[in-house]
Image (cartoon, grey):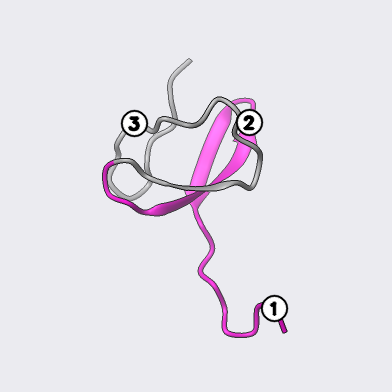
Amino acid sequence: MSAPTCPTCGAELLVPANAMKHELFPCQDCGTELEIVSLDPVAVELAPEVEEDWGE
């Protein structure tokens, strides 16, 4: 099974063994904030940007 790659820099990602779906973590190479969108197989996407009205 291949590891997911960063959509920004293409680096192979080291996803934590205890990762949960929708967890956010940074790319180890470029620092881009990523979101785990699937665990089987592991897939990531760019984390959503915080909108001004979040939390209202």
Amino acid found under the numbered disc labelled 1: Gly
Is 35 placed left or right of 28 in the picture? Answer: right
> Which circle's residue, 2 or 1, is located before the other in the chain?
2
Front of the two marks 1 and 3 = 1
Q: Earlier in the sequence, mark 1 or mark 3?
A: 3
Horizontal and vertical percent for residue 53?
64, 84
Residue 39 lies within the magenta run: yes
Q: Position of residue 42 (x, y in %)?
A: 56, 30
Q: Name the residue under label 3.
A: 12
Mark 3 and mark 2 lie on one chain; the one further toward the N terminus is 3
CB within 8 Å, label 2 to label 1: no
Q: In which quarter of the image is the C terminus?
A: bottom right
From this view, report whether residue 7 is shown above or below residue 52. above
Task: Report, in whole angstroms, how far the alpha carbon at label 2 lies from the one at label 1.
Answer: 27 Å
Task: Tell me, for residue 39, which label it has, or none.
Answer: 2
Image spot of residue 23 (x, y percent): 60, 46
Residue type at numbered disc 2: Leu
- Between disc 2 and disc 1, the foreground one is 1
At 57% from the left and 78% from the top, the residue drawn is 51
CA gap between label 1 and label 3 equals: 33 Å
The residue depicted at 43 percent of the width and 20 percent of the height is 2
Residue at the right extreme, as displayed: 56
Span colored in magenta:
29-56
Left or right relative to 7: residue 37: right
Give the CA distance from mark 3 to mark 2. Answer: 16 Å
Q: What residue type is labelled 3?
A: Glu
